[in-house]
Image (spheres, grey):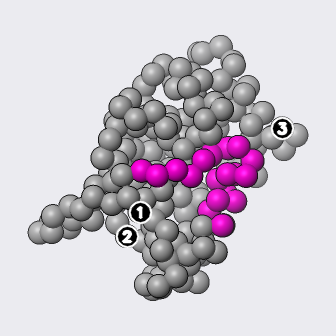
Amino acid sequence: MGFEDDSCTTLIFTYGTLKRGFSNHVLLQDLMRTGDAVFKGTYQTVGKYPLVCGPYRVPFLLNMPGSGHRVTGELYAVSARGLARVDELEGTSKGHYERRPILLMGGGNGDEEEEEVAAEAYYAHKSFEKEMWMKNGGKGFRAYSEKEARGYVKRKDRPQNLSFLDHVNIFISSPSA
């Protein structure tokens, strides 16, 4: 497992494929090996947020506080180098996700009291979040589990002739099943 490093100062909340047991967790495993990430525990959002799936069962947290549920995920402390790698995966420079503040509760392990923590999460880009919420029928889930991930398609296995935003736009504009 990784080791505590003073350079790991940014707290990021992961709620989807970056969590343990999911396809993109390999990135965080690599970062933990190099000391660029430290697992801090399982946490839950203080407020309610919509957690939905988009094209290819890709999870999106929507920055619409008060809707949805308190979302459960994992908290990691990352270095600047680690943050750059996660930002790249999440497509923050391409309009896929936006890294924004979020308040969490957790860290208690039975005897200890839970603490409130300010962190950052990757929200769906604001350009399509409302449409994504409507496409999901105004319903979200509490956690991205194996059930929600069923049908997830890895990036390398998706059609390469379209950008991810093309896939998002096709998804939100297609008739609901």
First in residue order: circle 1 vs circle 2:
2
Instruction: Name the residue located 40 percent from the left edge and 53 percent from the top edge.
Output: 73
Would you say the residues marked 1 and 3 are in contact, meaning their CB atoms lie under 8 Å apart? no
Name the image quarter holding the N terminus. Answer: bottom left
- The residue segment tinted magenta is 84-102
Q: Identify the image quadrant of residue 47.
A: top left
> Extreme left residue here?
111
Name the image quarter holding the C terminus. Answer: top right
Specify whether 94 is left or right of 104.
Answer: right
19 to 8, vertically: above or below: above
Instruction: Name the residue located 45 percent from the left edge and 22 percent from the top edge.
Output: 138
Q: CA distance from mark 1 to mark 3?
A: 32 Å
Give the labeled residue for mark 3.
162
> Extreme right residue here?
161
First in residue order: circle 1 vs circle 3:
1
Q: CA distance from mark 1 to mark 2?
A: 5 Å
Q: Identify the image quadrant of residue 38.
A: bottom left
- What's under tag 1, amino acid-wise? Leu
Q: Mark 3, mark 2: which one is toward the viewer? A: 2
- Judging from the image, what secondary structure is the residue with disc 1 in? strand
Give the number of the disc on residue 40: 2
- Judging from the image, what secondary structure is the residue with disc 3 in? loop
- What's under tag 3, amino acid-wise? Leu
First in residue order: circle 3 vs circle 2:
2
Give the labeled residue for mark 1.
75
Instruction: Name the residue located 48 percent from the left edge and 74 percent from the top edge.
Output: 9
